[in-house]
Image (spheres, helix red, strand yellow):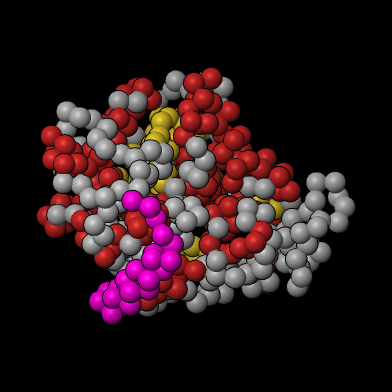
Amino acid sequence: MRFRFAAFRVIFAAAAVFWLSAAQTAAAQSNNDPDILAAYVYRYADYYLPYAIQSSTAYKPVGTLNTMRDTGLGDEVDYAVQNAIPASQEDLRGHARKIFKPWRYQFGSDAYLDCLDWADEACKTAYARRGWNFGSGPTYHVWARTRATARAACSEVSIAFRGTVGLSGGDWYSNLSRFGSPYDDYYKQLQRNVDTIMRQIQNLDCYRRAVRKPQIVSTGHSLGAGLAQFVALATKSGGPRVAKVIAFDPSPVTGAHLVNKALLAENVQRLVIDRVYESGEVLSYARAAVQEFPQAKSRCNPQVRTVEVKAARGSMMGLHGIELLATNLADLTYNEGNPLGYRAPATLVGSCDVIYRPDSDEQLIARSGSQRLAALRRVYARSGSRRLVSNPANPAARAAVTWVGSRSSNGGPDPRLAAGPASNAFALVAGGAFGFTPLPRAE
């Protein structure tokens, strides 16, 4: 069926009106809950950065990563970092490579998903009842974090989902899955294949080599963040579960309406969901108005935490880019070449029990030792002369965006120099002064 954008706009407007009238309003939360406010996010930026890089790379073809994987040289690490962080930020790229070095790409898909395993009777039954489709499917990449060599055991496996691309009919109708679309959208394709994907993960060499079974997490940006939450909600009983979701600038749609209530209740037990967003990005307003289950106010089963990053200024659409968010997270992890210490976000909050546990070497990484406080003081004393540039990934859509300090590679004038007062990620996060003041949340 040919996609007609004019017709889509009518459908989208009608669906939005229905959604806004039927969905529950998201409740505001106090600053005393487990959410991470912008003033404190620098402490955890190093933890979230690898997942932001994966979510950015999910927009790239699977075939390219398959070729790199097959060479066995780890080229996908450089490729992912270069894709997530612009060339003008080579200093940030160098730091991000060190953070992302343990990860290796395993497998993925960017094609329509009929049944990955035709021996799966449940999948065949669901496929026989499928609706119309656009010939496209959810794009995802599976990464594993290893200790040393490519053939070592892995401690964690991550499934990273791609967000919406352009005017793709399959992408946009998947965004409307909440309204009972007759299409075989990405949520439905994943629902009948998620258990096969989990079995494929279990069959990975690094997974089978591990003495302690690796944790499985899911991540993604925008639509991909909605899909990442969905796989955690929809995995069937009897196999490994997604222990944590890291959702960047997430869609309010999670696909929970497709999941059997008993299965949904089982899968949210001890689940952790971190929703990381740039303050002011377009979907933060949608999430403030409506949220499909689970709500942001959920504190146990699942434990939902919002993580606000306030490190850029610009338009709602411009602030939504994953490259912008990944670059700002990279900038928040160090000061003028000196990496800062960081903590993995707490998971045992209040009376909530959770599946996910950070690796022991991630509980506290104080790379700067006793110099950390001095380094932070230097951060907030940095000159305001560092240039601000618009996001190069989509200049037309993001021309109004300013982000972390950026300079041209040759030291000369940067043609993308943005107007307005100079600043940097740390100054924006902390309000331009040393010391932290809790900032209001966008949702």
Q: Nearer the viewer, residue 272 or 189?
A: 189
Residue 16 colored in magenta in the image? yes
On the image, the x and y values in percent for residue 147 come to 47, 29
Predominant SS of the magenta segment:
helix
Tell me what residue is drawn at x 39 percent, y 55 percent.
3
The magenta region covers: 1-23
Residue 348 colored in magenta in the image? no
Q: Nearer the viewer, residue 428 or 137?
A: 137
Q: Quadrant of residue 180?
A: bottom left
Q: In this picture, is 248 found above or below 207?
A: below
Residue 403 in sight in this render: no
Tell me what residue is drawn at x 52 percent, y 40 percent.
60
Tell me what residue is drawn at x 41 percent, y 68 percent.
9
Q: In this picture, is 294 found above or below 149?
A: below
On the image, the x and y values in percent for residue 200 come to 30, 30
Q: In this picture, is 211 found above or below 80?
A: above
Residue 254 falls left or right of residue 334: left
On the image, the x and y values in percent for residue 403 come to 66, 62
